Image (cartoon, rainbow, N blue to C red):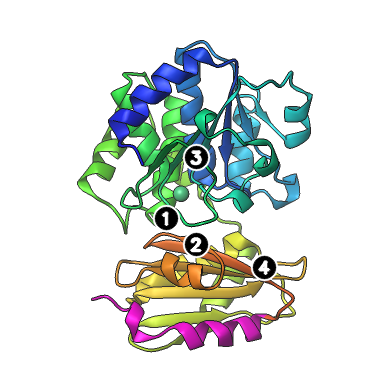
Amino acid sequence: MIDIKNLKINLENIIPLCEKVIIVPHKFADFDAIGSAIGLSLLARKFKKPSYIIDNDPLDKMEAGVKIIVDETSKEFNIINRDKYLNLSLNDNNLFILTDVNKKYLIYLEDLINNPDKTFILDHHEADNNTLESNYKYIDPSASSASEIVTKLLSLSKIKIPSNVAKYLLAGIYLDTNKLTKNVTSETMKMVAKLLESGAVMSDVINLFKEDYYSDRRVQELVSKIKMFNYSLAVIVANNEDEYSREELAKAADYALKYGCDGVFSVGNIGDNTISISARSNSGVNVGMIMQELGGGGNQFSGATKIINSTSEEVGEKLKNILTPRYYNR
Ligand SMILES: [Mn+2]
């Protein structure tokens, strides 16, 4: 693991030697993944290297706000899918930078990235044995978001952040801190201040979070299924017949934190024979660790996993069985 100064130095040494910089956010990109990826493009630009952001999410599965950002910026920042990537003139001299992700199964180019000397990882989720091999890992689970890390990196590299990019980075921080209500440090707020100084406008960021009325009703229906368990752990189990998006499950968990729960878990059917759990915490429990036990991961504040060939009710029972007081570290 390297520190942020070494991250900067290594990137500045290696980018000029590469042909292309390939930036890889996680599957089902959210504001933090896409915002931090766009921010990293500025680093490639500084060294006059072409950069590409890989987003292979089907358009109908993309979050509304993320789709707005992709539409606004896909030309300026070369946001491309896997097929377009394969059509580029590829060679061994490309550099990969993963952002907001470190696990192989959460990226679209898993099979194509295999040189640890040409792979950087920049993330705020815990590493585990599914972490992609890389000799340049910067993983800081105490950072609020990948966007916070990228803002810091750009500032260390003395790169001027244009106002549109500042807006996307601020949206990333805003999302991962549940609207600046959790996991906020003085470092987070310094980066927020830098982004505002760079021209991000808070009301524009809030506009990206605009809710669709019908989807918000669905989220609130999920919230109404909440059950409190030992101490202040809460579980939401959706009906298995109803299909939800990952985003709706995450929003329900985020929303329910306002009842003072230390950890909230939303369990629901996301289609494709898959049950997903989205977990959120204010600080009292490490939900990423709990998700690891069910094959997923995350960090103290946010975690997720998916389980195939099961029902939401079965997964809910399995989860309740492992929610023991040993996770309660207060
Ligand atoms: Mn993130």
Q: Nearer the viewer, residue 283 or 329?
A: 329
Which element is circle 3 on? strand
Residue 111 x, y percent position in the rendering = 69, 42
Circle 4: is it few (<14), some (14-19), or many (20+) Cα within 10 Å?
many
Q: Callout 1: few (<14), some (14-19), or many (20+) C-alpha neighbours within 10 Å? A: many
Callouts 1 and 2 close, C-beta under 8 Å: yes
Residue 100 visible in the picture: yes
Q: Amino acid at mark 4?
A: Tyr
| Residue 130 horizontal side relative to residue 3, left or right | right
Q: Which residues are magenta?
A: 312-330
Q: Which residue is mark 3?
A: 99
Which of the two residues, 22 or 268, is positioned nearer the viewer here? 22
Does residue 120 lie above or below 240 as drawn?
A: above
Q: Circle 1 — which element? A: loop
> Disc 4 on helix, strand or loop?
loop
Image point (59%, 16%), residue name: 50
